[in-house]
Each structure stands twice: as structure tokens, then as C-alpha cells.
Image (tube, helix red, strand yellow):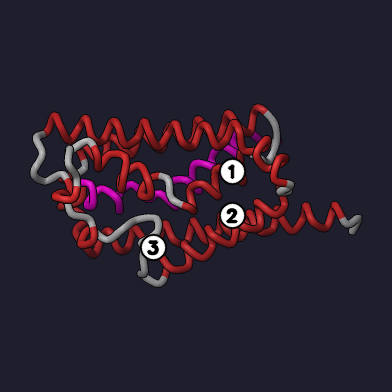
């Protein structure tokens, strides 16, 4: 297998579905009353929790599927469908509230502690939503130790990028503006839709092989 190509594909899928640049305005909105140090703590906790969730799912995914009788092809087809639907909605300019809630529905006053928001909504569902979970499980279940490791490392790299954007992204958000972020969302939607189609094709190929076609 071309591991470099696989790693690039996995990272592109995570980048498109999590879209940290689009998530940064939400982070800035719900932490606007916090100090810079608290913002860093919130961002750090959010990415660490998100990474742990995805890493555990990647490692235990195969065992869980075997226990439930779920095949890899079924997971790839489902993950591909979810990724394509979210990507298609992003292409239409309709960001998914499942993965990235609109800032207007997230109020920092809802949290008893500033660090509470690091768990929800930042870690879940903004960083680790249904699409991210489906993508992680689809790719980590693709093979053996190497594929699982690459998937975990790719998401870890995304977490680093996300942390840097959360902490230092205010000038970038101001520079891009609403129009720039919308354009970027549509670009990420295109990438995500392509990733979804590829997962669907992989799942379909697995089904045909199992049928002896």
C-alpha cells in the first residue's frame, strides 16, 4: 500500500470534515469573555479530549465491529454516505449543525466553568462529530497496525493545527471575513464529498469481492 498517499487522504478527510478554520470563529465567540490563558487551556483540553476519543475508537473499532457483526464494507458505505452528505451540504453553503453548531446556538453562559465548553461543544461535536467518527473508523478499519497508526497520527496532526488556529487564529478570521470563510467551507465541502465518494467506492468494491464478482 502507498502509505504516504493513504496518510494524505486520511488527513484531507479529517481536515475537510472538522474544518478548523470554520470552527475558529465559534471558539472565539464562546470564549470571548475568557482571558488569553484560559482560552489556551480550553483549546488544549478540547483537542486532547478529541484526540483521545478518536484514538480509542481507532484502536477498538475492529473488535467492536466484530462483536456487533458489522463488516468493513458496511462501515465504509455508511461513512462514505455521511461524509458525502455533509460535504454536499457544505457545497450548497449549508454547514451541518451536527458537526459545527452555529455560534448563535452556543452561549458561553450555559457553562458553569470555562473548561466545560472544552468538552462540549468543542471536543464533541465540533471536533469529533458523527462525520469525524465515521471517517476515523472507516480508515482505521481499512487494514492493520499501520493504517490504525496513520489514522491516529493524522488526527493528532489535525488537533495540533486546530489548537494553533484556536489560540492564534483571530487575525486570520478577521482577514478572511465571513465571505472568505464561506468560500473555504465550500472548498472543504468539495474535498469532503470526494472523500465520501471514495469511501463508497471502497465499500462497494469490498462487497463485490465478497460476492465473487
Residue 72 position, x and y percent, is 71, 47
Of 41 and 91, nearer the camera is 41
Assign the N terminus to one quadrant of the image: top right
Q: Residue at x 68, y 35 (%)?
A: 63
Q: Residue at x 70, y 53 (%)?
A: 202
Count neighbours of disc 3 (C-alpha within 10 A) and say few if under 14, some if 14 to 19, many if 20 or more: some
Report helix, strand or loop for mark 1.
Answer: helix
Assign the C terminus to one quadrant of the image: bottom right
Marks 2/1 in contact by CB < 8 Å: the verdict is yes
Report helix, strand or loop for mark 3.
Answer: loop
Circle number at residue 96: 3
Count neighbours of disc 2 (C-alpha within 10 A) and say few if under 14, some if 14 to 19, many if 20 or more: many
Q: Earlier in the sequence, mark 3 or mark 1?
A: 3
Up the image or down, 38 lies above or below 124; here it is above
Circle number at residue 137: 1
User: On the picture, is 152 further left or further right than 94?
Assistant: right
Q: Residue at x 50, y 30 (%)?
A: 153
Residue 6 position, x and y percent, is 61, 39
Marks 2/3 in contact by CB < 8 Å: the verdict is no
Region in magenta: 1-27
Amino acid at each position: 500500500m502507498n502509505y504516504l498517499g493513504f496518510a494524505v487522504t486520511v488527513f484531507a478527510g479529517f481536515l475537510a470534515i472538522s474544518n478548523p478554520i470554520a470552527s475558529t470563529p465559534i471558539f472565539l465567540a464562546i470564549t470571548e469573555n475568557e482571558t488569553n490563558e484560559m482560552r489556551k487551556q480550553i483549546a488544549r483540553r478540547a483537542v486532547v479530549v478529541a484526540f483521545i476519543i478518536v484514538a480509542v475508537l481507532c484502536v477498538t473499532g475492529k473488535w467492536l465491529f466484530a462483536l456487533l457483526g458489522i463488516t468493513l464494507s458496511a462501515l465504509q458505505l455508511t461513512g462514505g454516505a455521511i461524509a458525502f452528505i455533509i460535504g454536499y451540504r457544505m457545497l450548497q453553503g449549508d454547514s451541518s449543525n451536527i458537526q459545527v453548531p452555529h455560534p448563535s446556538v452556543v452561549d458561553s453562559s450555559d457553562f458553569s466553568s470555562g473548561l466545560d465548553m472544552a468538552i462540549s461543544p468543542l471536543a464533541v461535536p465540533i471536533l469529533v462529530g458523527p462525520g469525524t467518527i465515521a471517517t476515523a473508523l472507516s480508515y482505521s478499519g481499512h487494514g492493520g497496525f499501520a493504517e490504525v497508526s496513520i489514522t491516529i497520527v493524522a488526527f493528532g496532526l489535525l488537533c495540533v493545527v486546530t489548537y494553533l488556529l484556536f489560540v492564534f487564529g483571530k487575525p486570520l478570521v478577521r482577514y478572511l471575513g465571513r465571505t472568505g470563510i464561506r468560500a473555504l467551507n465550500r472548498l472543504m465541502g468539495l474535498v469532503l464529498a470526494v472523500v465520501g465518494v471514495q469511501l463508497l467506492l471502497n465499500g462497494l468494491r469490498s462487497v463485490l469481492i465478497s460476492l465473487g464478482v
